[in-house]
Image (tube, rainbow, N blue to C red):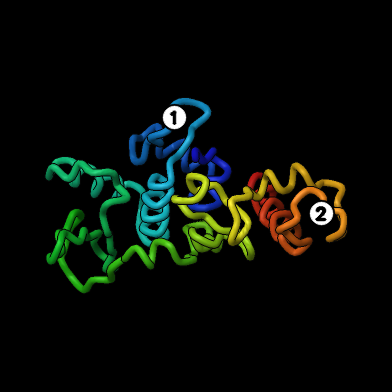
Amino acid sequence: MAYDTYMASYLSGATVDQLRHWARKKILVPEVNDHRPLLYSFRDIVALRAVAKLRAFTSLQRISKALKTLKDQDFTDHLSAYRFGFDGRSIKLWTDDELLDIDKNPGQFEMYTFEDIYKPFENFNHRLVPALLEPSPGITVNPSIMGGTPTVNGTRTSFDTLLNFTEDIESDEELEDVFPFLTMEDVKNARSFKTSLDELVA
């Protein structure tokens, strides 16, 4: 699954303009396609969420400097492999069993675990970024199902495929002919998710 900039923006908490800027500045270059159209992998989304979460507390300049420090210290894995934290003064990296200050000033520490990155959070623009694995009621993002394409809970049916085939369907009876295992509630959830994406683009 490759996420375009709008889906990446919705799932990560970074704006479309930020995504483009971060790609240009090499803060996070999408690994699926780094030219237009920018296309992101699931682990890119996880990394973007970490950067967006840090950006809610500190400047992009400091984040960029910290990420450069990572490379200078030979931390060359994909950014999604690392756990970051911010203590109000300094960006920290968790390495196995110790904290590495990759910014400045050691101090009290707040860890961003996988759970924290996957949970909802408020970004720099005060937009509530949805939970990564369930970004909308009835919609699931699972990298092992359809490559992380947002799907209807408990199925392998992507939300956009469902919408493409049910544009004029308004009852369970009509839906049964096309998707006998889905309900109008599933269609409603897919429509709601699409509306949220459209509102982000508008």
Q: Which picture quadrant has residue 106?
A: bottom left
Q: Which residue is drawn at 17% across and 45% down?
A: 75
Q: Which amino acid does label 1 sit on?
A: Asn
Secondary structure at badge 1 equals loop
Q: Which residue is drawn at 87% across and 47% down?
A: 168
**73 horizontally vs 86: left or right:** left
Task: Return the x and y of residue 133 as percentages of the image width and height.
Answer: 49, 60
Task: Return the x and y of residue 169 as percentages of the image width and height.
Answer: 86, 51
Q: Which amino acid does label 2 sit on?
A: Leu
Q: Which residue is drawn at 39% across and 62% down?
A: 117
Task: Return the x and y of residue 95 as percentages of the image width and height.
Answer: 16, 59
Tell me the CA gap for discs 2 and 1: 36 Å
Circle 1 packing at 10 Å, graded few (<14), some (14-19), many (20+), is some
Which of labels 2 and 1 is toward the front?
2
Q: Residue furthest bottom?
A: 108
112 relative to 60, above or below:
below
Circle 2 packing at 10 Å, graded few (<14), some (14-19), many (20+), is many
Q: Residue furthest top?
A: 35
Q: How many labels does the image show?
A: 2
Secondary structure at badge 2 equals helix
Split into 4 quadrants, where in the image is the C terminus? top right
Task: Return the x and y of residue 151 as percentages of the image width and height.
Answer: 60, 53
154 relative to 43, above or below:
below
Q: Which picture quadrant has residue 32?
A: top left
Q: Mark 1 points at which residue?
A: 33
Q: Mark 2 points at which residue?
A: 175
> Which sits earlier in the primary sequence, circle 2 or circle 1?
1
Q: Which residue is drawn at 38% across and 67% down?
A: 116
